[in-house]
Image: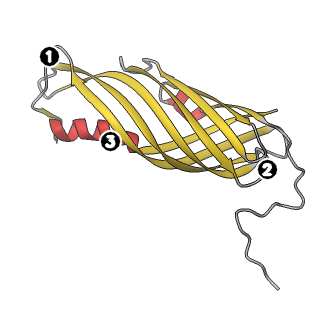
Amino acid sequence: MTSVPSFSQVDATDTIDHSSHAINLNPLGILGGALGLSYEYLFMRHHGIFVDGSYVFPLFQKNKGYGAGVQYRFHFHPRMKSNYIGAFYTMGYAEASIPDANRVIYDFSLKSQVAGINYGWRSRLFKTKLHYDYRFGLGIPFSTFKWGKNGRPESIGSLRTRTFENIYKYSAILDLGFSVGYSF
């Protein structure tokens, strides 16, 4: 008889990981000029608190920014190697510049706060304390977009300025994350 595996079943060949702490680094962010670090503490068998922070450094342009967040996670398995659901709150600030068709530079800034829910998975690499973690979710953004000293351009490339502003303001609706780390 064949059984359909569910997300709450445990692989019988796997040893149980009793770690209650995890430190993570976002390797993809570094490629784009951002440093993202996070920490999770599993304070009960299924319940975890996750905090993260990020800093965007001027790698290719003069963009910069920072962000921080906190999440509650419910793990379906009583350990770090588990899928989870969670509620999150993040806040951030970013500054950037963009030229218009006449090569006039326009500075802008964005302050945002987002609250939402997510789903993710943490799995160990080769049954070691090393792991990877990914998540996706949706949130409700509360954002403020401001133009700098040159004011507001009429258009940015083929985009109307309002469309450009809305892309930035509402891009925070998605909570996407990938990290690698160490559990202890």
Q: Up-down: is 180 above or below 75?
A: above
Most foreground residue, 81 or 126: 81
Disc number lying in front (2 or 3)? 2
Q: Which mark is on residue 170?
A: 3
Element type where label 2 sits in the image: loop
- x, y percentage for residue 37? 61, 27
Residue for point 63% across, 35% down: 50
**Residue where numbered disc 2 is placed:** 78
User: Does residue 85 appear in this view?
Assistant: yes
On the picture, is 76 further left or further right than 94?
right
Give, as a three-letter code, the residue at label 3. Answer: Tyr
User: What amino acid is at disc 2?
Assistant: Pro
Instruction: Calculate the distance from the C-alpha at mark 2 to the C-alpha at mark 3.
Output: 35 Å
Q: Is mark 1 on a helix, strand or loop?
A: loop
Q: What residue type is labelled 1?
A: Asn
Q: In which quarter of the image is residue 109?
A: top left
Residue at horizontal 33 percent and vertical 36 percent from the top: 142
Horizontal side, residue 148 vs residue 117: left or right:
left
CA neighbours of label 3 inside 10 A, class few (<14), some (14 to 19), many (20+) = some
Q: Earlier in the sequence, mark 1 or mark 3?
A: 1
